[in-house]
Image (cartoon, rainbow, N blue to C red):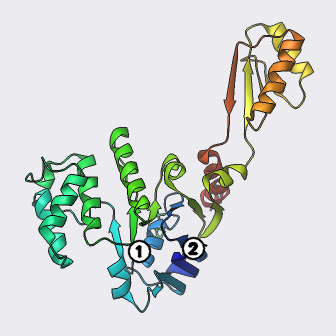
Amino acid sequence: MKSSAIAVSGLRKAYGDKVVLDGIDFEVAAGSVFSMLGPNGAGKTTTVNVLTTLLKADAGTVRVMGHDVATATKEVRSVIGVTGQFAAVDELLSGRENLQLMADLKRVRSGDQVVTRLLERFDLVESAAKLASTYSGGMRRKLDLAMTLVGNPQIIFLDEPTTGLDPRSRRTMWEIVRELVAEGTTIFLTTQYLDEADELADRIVVLSDGRIAAEGSADELKRLIPGGHVRLRFTDPAAYRAAATALREVTTDDETLSLQIPSDGSQRELRVILDWLDSAGIEADELTLHTPDLDDVFLALTERTSKEAIAQ
Ligand code: ADP
C-alpha cells in the first residue's frame, strides 16, 4: 500500500456557534491526486487552511508527510506548496522577478537556473520580462503554479486552479498536474468543476454539511446513484405507443413522444433494446444514452443539505 502523504482524523473547526468541520477523516496517498468537492461554504478552504498550517483546528489530528500540523509547523511548510487566487503573484514585478523573489525567499540553491527552467517549462520565456499585471488569466495561473514549484514541494495544494480559465488554458493546467503526479508529487485539489475532479483525481471526497458525504474514485461515486437511462424518441405516435406498451419499466412522455428506459449503458443492455425494437418492427427516430456523471452524484449528495439550509 502507498504511504499516506496526508492523514486527517477527527478534524473539527467551528467559528463561534457555526460548526464548519464536524469531525472529518481522510487519507491522501503519496503520489496521487486527491480532490475535495463541496458546494460553496462547505468548508473546503477551511480544510486547506488547517492542512497548510494557516489555521488551528479545534480538535483532531492532521499529519502532513508524518509531521503534525499543530506542532511541527516549520516542517510541514517545508514540504508543501500552496497555490490559489494568485495570492503570491506580485503585479508590479515581471514573471522572472516573481520567480526570483520566491527562490530567494526559499533560499534555493542555483536560483537562476531553477527560475529559467520553470519559465521554460511553463512556456513563459517570451513574457518573462513583462509585468505580471499584463499577463492573461492563464499565464497568471501558470506563473502562480511555477512559483509554488520553486523548492520542489512534495505536496501541492491547488485551490480551484482553473476557475475562470478558457478551455485551452484549463487543458494546459491539467497536463501540468499530470506531469507533476508522474514525477511523484502529491496533489490536493479543491475544485468546483466536477469534470476536473473526474479527469484528474484518483480519489474524491464530497464535503457536505461539515461531514464527508461520500468518498471514492469517480467511478465508485457514479455507481452510488442510479440515473443511467436510454432515451428513445419517436415521430410516429403509433410506434411510440407500441413501444410504450411493450417495454417494461419505461417512463413515458406523451408530449415529446419519448421513452426513458433505465439502463447501465452497457453494450449488452443496449443490444437487448435494439434487438427488441428490430424484432417488433419499430423504428425510433433518436436514441440517446445518459450515464450518471459526477454532477448527478454531487446533486444527489448535496441536495438534502441545501434544502435544509433554505428551510432554516
Ligand atoms: P468553501 O471553501 O467550501 O466555500 P469555507 O471553508 O470558505 O468554505 O467556509 C465554510 C464556512 O465557514 C462558511 O459558512 C463561511 O462563511 C464560514 N467561515 C469561513 N471563514 C470564517 C471566519 N473567519 N469567521 C467566520 N466564519 C467563517
Q: Is residue 133 left or right of residue 32?
A: left
Q: Residue furthest bottom?
A: 71
Label 2 or label 1, whichever lies nearer to me, is 2
Q: Which mark is residue 49?
A: 1
x%, y% of residue 1? 61, 73
Q: Which residue is mark 2?
A: 27
Residue in the foreground of this view, choosing between 101 and 111:
111
Q: Residues within 10 Å of mark 1 (few under 14, many from 20)?
A: some
Whole-Å distance between the Cαs marked 2 and 1? 16 Å
Q: Residues within 10 Å of mark 2 (few under 14, many from 20)?
A: some
Residue at 24% over, 64% down: 147
Q: Secondary structure at mark 2?
A: strand
Q: Quadrant of residue 93?
A: bottom left
Residue in the foreground of this view, choosing between 109 and 12:
109
Quarter of the displayed picture in which ligand 1 can be seen: bottom left
Q: Is residue 127 left or right of residue 88?
A: left
Residue at 86% over, 8% down: 281
Asked if 260 appears above or below 7 in the picture, the reply is above
Q: Quadrant of the C terminus?
A: bottom right
x%, y% of residue 113? 15, 65
Q: Which mark is residue 231?
A: none
Is residue 90 at least partly visible in the picture?
Answer: no
